[in-house]
Image (cartoon, rainbow, N blue to C red):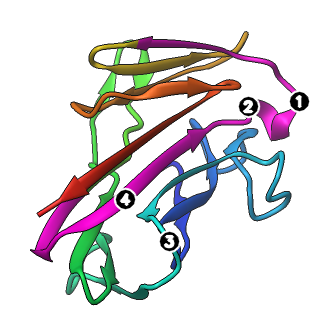
Amino acid sequence: MRTTALVGMNGSIDWFCVPDFDSPSVFAAILDEKKGGQFQIAPIGDDWNTKQYYLPETNVLVTRFLSDEGVAEIVDYMPVAGRTEEGASHVIVRRVTGVRGELKLKMHCAPAFSYARDAHETDVSEYGTIFKSNDLSLGLFTNIPVTEDDGAVVAEFSLR
């Protein structure tokens, strides 16, 4: 309840400031698609349609990808967390599931700290990735292997 994320119909988080609404951005593709940073999970190829809706009376967003081969969906939400001694916890949960058939997807996570002004390091491990700038660190936790690509991480996977 201190920040928000904008998720596009293409499965991309294109705007996210952390830890507060008025903090510098981490994802700002809405301002600059090439340098702004984004976190996209979407089907590979162009032959798919999207439906997007909120679960009733919640802030839980469902983005559903539909194609002839299958259907997959992303459920995005930010759990409400209590304050800790270190400050508020800020988490975006992106749960990706197969609904029907088989669909191949690609994940591309490319943060651009402080409106793409701050450099960062990318540390990949078997549990995900840590992105570190001078002022902020972000963790991406996944059980799908990722590879580093110029400060971003990518992965391709299939859902059934």
> Which secondary structure class fits the magenta region best?
strand
In the rendered view, does 80 fall on the left or right side of 160?
Answer: right
Can residue 156 be seen here? The reply is: yes
**Depicted 97 relative to depicted 131: above or below:** below
Pinpoint residue 101: horizontal percent, then vertical percent. Answer: 12, 76
The residue tagged 4 is 105
Of tags 1 and 4, the one toward the viewer is 4
Q: Earlier in the sequence, mark 1 or mark 3?
A: 3
**Residue under the point 80% across and 18% down:** 119
Q: Earlier in the sequence, mark 4 or mark 2?
A: 4
In the rendered view, does 27 fall on the left or right side of 99?
Answer: right
- Quadrant of the snapshot with the C terminus: bottom left
* Pointer 1 with pointer 4, Cβ within 8 A: no
Query: How far apart are labels 4 and 2 at the CA level?
Result: 25 Å
Query: How far apart are labels 1 and 3 at the CA level?
Result: 31 Å
Q: Inspect the image, locate mark 4, and give the three-letter code of the amino acid beneath it.
A: Leu
* Pointer 1 with pointer 2, Cβ within 8 A: yes
The residue tagged 2 is 113
